[in-house]
């Protein structure tokens, strides 16, 4: 009987494979607006279920992870890009 269970398991796809196939199918059947709408709904639900401290904590964790993975030059580059973008906004006004 154990042999039958092994054969049955061999015919089943893994959870990872099922997720990948489902994701591919969803991507084929939906457009950018679909993903924007579910993202918006998810963001609204998260905002309703979490407080300021939640966002502070995930921001802190993200900042720590970023600083562990990037060097001084990274911060100089993004600072320069931000400064240039702000200067362009001011020029437009």
Image (cartoon, helix red, strand yellow):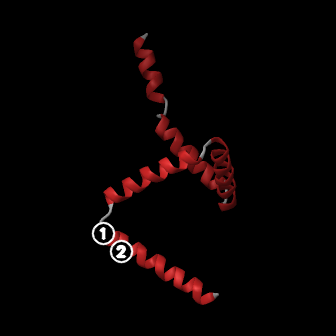
Q: Position of residue 58 (x, y in %)?
A: 48, 49
Q: Secondary structure at mark 2?
A: helix
Q: CB atoms at circles 2 and 1 under 8 Å apart?
A: yes
Q: Position of residue 36 (x, y in %)?
A: 66, 58
What's the distance in space between the residues labelled 2 and 1, CA to CA? 6 Å
Q: Position of residue 21 (x, y in %)?
A: 54, 45
Q: How many numbered tags mark residues here? A: 2
Q: Foreground residue, 51 or 7?
A: 51
Q: Residue at x 60, y 49 (%)?
A: 25
Q: Secondary structure at mark 1?
A: helix
Q: Residue at x 38, y 58 (%)?
A: 66
Q: Foreground residue, 13 or 30?
A: 30
- Which quadrant does the C terminus fall into? bottom right
Direction from residue 72 to residue 37 in the image, left or right: right
Identify the residue under disc 2.
76
Task: Indicate whether 89 appears above or below 48.
Answer: below
Q: Position of residue 35 (x, y in %)?
A: 64, 55
Q: Residue at x 42, y 73 (%)?
A: 78
Identify the residue under disc 1.
72
Tell me where residue 71 sits by quadrant: bottom left
Name the residue furthest bottom: 91
């Amino acid at each position: 009987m154990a042999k039958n269970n092994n054969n049955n398991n061999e015919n089943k796809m893994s959870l990872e494979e099922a997720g990948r196939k489902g994701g591919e199918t969803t991507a084929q059947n939906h457009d950018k607006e679909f993903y924007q709408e579910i993202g918006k709904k998810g963001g609204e639900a998260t905002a309703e279920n979490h407080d300021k401290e939640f966002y502070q904590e995930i921001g802190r964790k993200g900042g720590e992870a970023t600083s562990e993975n990037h060097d001084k030059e990274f911060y100089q580059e993004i600072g320069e890009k931000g400064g240039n973008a702000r200067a362009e906004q001011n020029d437009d006004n």
